[in-house]
Amino acid sequence: MTRWLSALLFLFAPSLACGGESGYTYQPTELKARPFLDAQTVATLPTRSQVEIVRRQGAWMQIRTPEKREGWVRMLSVRLGNPDAKPSGGNFLSVIGIRSRPRAQTTGTVTTGVRGFSEEDLAKAEPNPAEAEKLKGFAAKPADANRVAQTGGLSAKPVPYFDEDGKPLGAKK
Amino acid sequence: MSAPRNGLTAAVVAVVLLGGCDGGGLNIQNVDVGSIVRSVADLRPVQEPEEIEIGQGMLETLLGARPLLDDPELQRYVNGVGLWVARQSERPDLPWQFGVNDSDHINAFAAPGGYIIVTKGMMASLRNEAELAGVLGHEIAHVVQKHHLRALRKNAVINLLSEGASAASSESRHKEMVEMLIGPTRELYARGLDKSDEFEADRMGVVLAARAGYDPYGLPAVMTTLAAVNPADSYLALLYKTHPAPDARIQQLMTGMGTRFDAFAEARQNATRFQQATRRLQLAER
């Protein structure tokens, strides 16, 4: 019974959590009126301020505070989960469950038994040439890649690599 | 052809002996075999066909640890996105292959020559295609920079492989190469690369995703997901063992990216297409 209950919870929890993700500021963070560095600073949120994530846009996150204050903060200033427990205490499934990612398998049966890729699995791995052959069959051709780009509204841009200080690097071999 | 054959057998033995000795120095009759093999290996660059064959050999063992997920549509989708990103790299014409394996754990790895595997657990933890592009970009960077090849070279495996390479017909040669690579593959993917290689792959992954037209903050967003998972979670054990902590990676990316990537604010995330492609994913109950 408990098992079924937890199975059901597992299936529906993500959709219940559809309101969005929550997190907290990892450092003192400026709350901006708009997602630009030169936008007006509405407030400075102290470290470990709780935030509700409304949406993400590039380097920025639109957030809402418990006091219903809204604005934009740098995405990398925010950590997901509960500010009172770091790590959030959540296991992996609960962490991805706090997200609003819709999952379609509401009618599927829950698979039991974790399929790992652990150190132990690696230690006893034997070659599986048949799987490698199967993978080859899924390989894309340049035309497939171009179609992915076209249908996805993606266009190639020249962007230089950068070093650890953020200095752009020349063409790399 | 008995002479090269014996050479190959000796090479296999040497690989076994050297497998776990990380620069420790293996002395046989006062001769440091490791250093000789290493110096020879350093003199000879690995040719691309050889690199691809080594990667193929490692792939076979990696897929032996966990087979592919039975979801052809998803596999083709990941290959399309992956190749589009890889085409923006300095090695666009490698025979790039991308796969999702049937593992609940969160991880992704690359093998020389353009073979990249992402776990089902990793796929399930991603929000959109820009995050996928960032993860694949990170792995593509390992291939472009030949990080794994260099790690193998450190263990003197490369030279031994090419010593064996001339020994026999291509089919049996490949089989022998795969056999020889089992130990080094198990060891390398359990130990991981140098931290500096991982940080470099993060920086390059961000750029490759941006070049491909994606939101460059996909990979950093993945790091924030990882940072939220309890490090003691067994699903992340191998990833944590083989990579710097997510907080350190976020910190490095913040410094490196600065504000230069703010110009990409309108770049694509393609969340709808990603969710459509991953709709059949199921993870085990815990």
Image: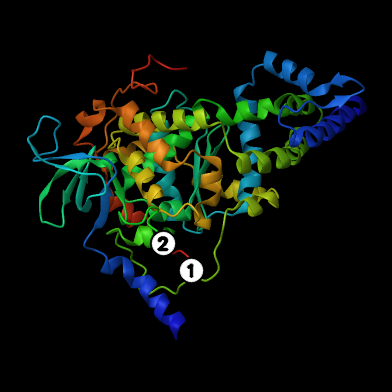
**Residue B148 % position (x, y):** 59, 31
- The residue wearing badge 1 is B286
Residue B261 sits in which quadrant? top left
**Residue B236 % position (x, y):** 50, 52
Chain for disc number 1: B
Is A117 on the left or on the right of B284, as rendered? right
- Cα separation, mark 2 vs mark 1, equals 8 Å
Residue B157 sits in which quadrant? top right
One can see residue A27 in this view = yes
Which element type, helix, strand or loop, lies under badge 2? Answer: helix
**Residue B103 % position (x, y):** 53, 56
Q: Amino acid at mark 2?
A: Leu
Q: Nearer the viewer, residue A65 or A60?
A: A65
**Mark 2 neighbour density, 10 Å: few (under 14) some (14–19) many (20 or more):** many
Q: Nearer the viewer, residue B28 or B230?
A: B230
Q: Are marks 2 and 1 on the same chain?
A: no
- The residue wearing badge 2 is A93
- Which residue does the image show at 32% across and 42% down from the upper left? B130
Q: Nearer the viewer, residue B226 or A14?
A: B226
Which element type, helix, strand or loop, lies under badge 1? Answer: loop
